[in-house]
Image (spheres, helix red, strand yellow):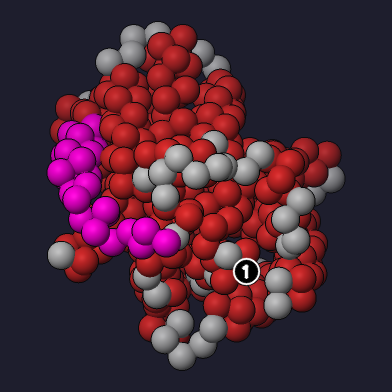
């Protein structure tokens, strides 16, 4: 029965990834329909990010009261509602309205599900589960593309994903007895109605500031690379836009393949060793990108950076209970998720200002600074929580 629950969680991670890539892929087809500027995508993504941060910060309270299984099932249902709402929207204000449950659903399920896996399963599963998340982000654009070619509208893709999420939410609700059997009654992180921590109390936990900064810097690095890799190749390496878009996907492929490989490596190495190895790969990748040999070194650098990013996110999450204790892990993972989404919201946009006013060629330097701060913060975390 435990194995059945693990299978369900694996598919739930695919469901987490599906909505994450939908909006960006479909926006070029959406904004002409709503007669708004292309820049209005920033408004929607900001609302989603704010909702995600709010629900992440309340993840500890919700999980203690209702349990990880119920929070996950309800959050997926909320996301499915938002996806269906998008598909029936006929104006931009309606998109804004449904962006609220879109963000709220994403943050709470992310925090609850990641903490549950960190408490109950080995590190290899955390890496493989995030690999499945990557598969979900890859599937999403293909679903939108299929909808556009088969019916000429992005709506078809959203409704197909909406159906998948409804099915997934139904399975999650039915599987609730499995979640209860897996829970350890002595684990206060999953005992309903126990006292949750305030944000001030969480931040004051020894090592919490360091892990928040580590997460913030990692997501700065990952999110900025995802957003700007294609533009960097077009403006710095002078290659056609279509080719740049295809080559930028090598970062995603490196990230997803790296997490599949990381699952096996975690059987031999600790989370701390995996994080350090990932940081070393990123360092090599960024140095290679700085070499003056054109597109070849840029491609190699992107692949190495993606491989380096692969183990860091899942290993930081999986090590949270050992750093802070099972009773505080849900609260700390909540602020980690909030830090992650805050970074994704602010830091890629900050590099946009740098690229516009100075040069897009500074991308590897910007990423190197994030890597250096992340390394120092993670080493400080290791010392404080040893």
Rendering quarter of residue 32? top left
Q: Position of residue 279 (x, y in %)?
A: 65, 74
Q: Is residue 160 magenta?
A: no
Question: Looking at this view, is 95 or 187 the one in front?
Answer: 187
Residue 134 occupies which quadrant of the picture?
A: bottom left
Query: From the viewer's perspective, is residue 141 above or below residue 239?
Result: above
Question: Residue 295 placed where, x, y %?
Answer: 60, 67
Picture residue at 15% right of the left edge, 44% below the top: 174
Residue 66: x, y in percent? 37, 39
Q: Nearer the viewer, residue 306 or 233?
A: 306
Task: Give left or right: position of 111 versus 70.
Answer: right
Please name the residue that numbered disc 1 is placed on.
Answer: 323
Task: Identify the residue at horizontal 75%, vertical 61% (top origin).
Answer: 206
Number of other residues with Cα within 10 Å of mark 1, as a class: few under 14, some 14 to 19, many 20 or more:
many
Q: Is residue 167 magenta?
A: yes
For the question of whether residue 62 can be seen, the reply is yes
Residue range (magenta): 162-186
């Amino acid at each position: 029965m435990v194995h059945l629950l693990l299978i369900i969680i694996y598919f739930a991670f695919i469901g987490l990834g599906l909505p994450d890539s939908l909006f960006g892929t479909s926006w070029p087809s959406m904004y002409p329909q709503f007669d708004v500027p292309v820049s209005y995508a920033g408004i929607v993504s900001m609302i989603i990010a704010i909702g995600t941060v709010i629900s992440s910060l309340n993840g500890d309270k919700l999980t203690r009261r209702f349990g990880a299984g119920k929070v996950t099932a309800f959050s997926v249902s909320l996301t499915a509602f938002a996806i269906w709402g998008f598909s029936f929207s006929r104006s931009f204000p309606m998109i804004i309205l449904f962006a609220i449950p879109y963000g709220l659903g994403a943050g709470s399920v992310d925090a609850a599900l990641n903490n549950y896996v960190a408490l109950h399963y080995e590190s290899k599963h955390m890496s493989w589960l995030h690999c499945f998340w990557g598969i979900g982000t890859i599937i999403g654009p293909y679903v939108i593309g299929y909808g556009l070619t088969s019916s000429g509208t992005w709506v078809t893709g959203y409704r197909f994903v909406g159906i998948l999420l409804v099915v997934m939410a139904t399975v999650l609700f039915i599987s609730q007895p499995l979640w209860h059997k897996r829970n350890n009654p002595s684990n206060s992180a999953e005992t309903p109605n126990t006292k949750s921590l305030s944000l001030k109390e969480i931040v004051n936990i020894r090592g919490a500031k360091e892990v928040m900064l580590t997460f913030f810097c990692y997501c700065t690095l990952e999110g900025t690379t995802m957003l700007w890799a294609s533009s960097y190749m077009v403006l710095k390496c002078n290659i056609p836009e279509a080719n740049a878009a295809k080559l930028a996907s090598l970062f995603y492929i490196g990230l997803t393949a790296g997490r599949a490989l990381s699952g096996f490596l975690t059987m031999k190495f600790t989370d701390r060793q995996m994080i350090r190895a990932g940081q070393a790969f990123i360092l090599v990748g960024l140095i290679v990108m700085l070499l003056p040999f054109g597109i070849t070194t840029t491609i190699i650098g992107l692949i190495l950076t993606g491989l380096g990013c692969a183990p860091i996110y899942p290993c930081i999450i999986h090590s949270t209970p050992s750093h802070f204790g099972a009773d505080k892990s849900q609260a700390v993972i909540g602020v980690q998720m909030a830090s992650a989404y805050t970074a994704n919201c602010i830091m890629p946009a900050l590099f946009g200002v740098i690229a516009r006013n100075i040069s897009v060629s500074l991308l590897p330097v910007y990423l190197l600074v994030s890597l250096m701060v992340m390394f120092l913060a993670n080493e400080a975390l290791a010392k404080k929580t040893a």
